[in-house]
Amino acid sequence: MTPTPNDGDATSLLMPGTEVEVVIRFSGEWAAGFEIAGVDQGRYHLRRRSDRAVLPATFAPRHVRPTWRPAARG
């Protein structure tokens, strides 16, 4: 599993609404299509962007990273 820039430091918690990827536990790959729904005791509640459903599990910061987007060309 690749370390993330958000490796559990409480000062770097992601804000609700931030688009994120989550690590797939079985393969170690990252899956896009989620956003932060909330933060509780340093763990993330995630919402699927496709149907707006909040997932029933919470996720540690090391399993979530902001979605990377290339800079827009001017």
Image (cartoon, helix red, strand yellow):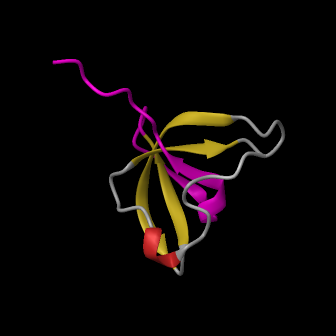
Image location (x, y in percent) of residue 12: 45, 68
Query: Which quadrant of the structure image shows residue 22?
Result: top right
Is residue 69 rendered to the left or right of residue 28?
A: left
Image location (x, y in percent) of residue 31: 61, 34
**Nearer the observer, 69 or 64:** 69
Query: Which quadrant of the structure image shows residue 16?
Result: bottom left
Q: How many marks?
A: 0
Query: Which quadrant of the structure image shows residue 52?
Result: top left
Image location (x, y in percent) of residue 32: 53, 34
Is residue 54 rendered to the left or right of residue 16?
A: right
* Extent of the magenta region: 49-74
Residue, x 59% and y 63% (percent of image)?
Answer: 61
Q: Is residue 62 magenta?
A: yes
Residue, x 50% and y 54% (percent of image)?
Answer: 46
Image location (x, y in percent) of residue 67: 46, 39
Is residue 73 rendered to the left or right of residue 60?
A: left
Q: Is residue 14 above or below residue 55?
A: below
Q: Is residue 8 above or below residue 50?
A: below
Return the residue found at the far left.
74
Residue, x 37% and y 26% (percent of image)?
Answer: 70
Residue, x 78% and y 46% (percent of image)?
Answer: 1
User: Where, quadrant-wise, is the C terminus in this rendering?
Assistant: top left
Return the residue found at the far top.
73
Is residue 28 rendered to the left or right of residue 71?
A: right
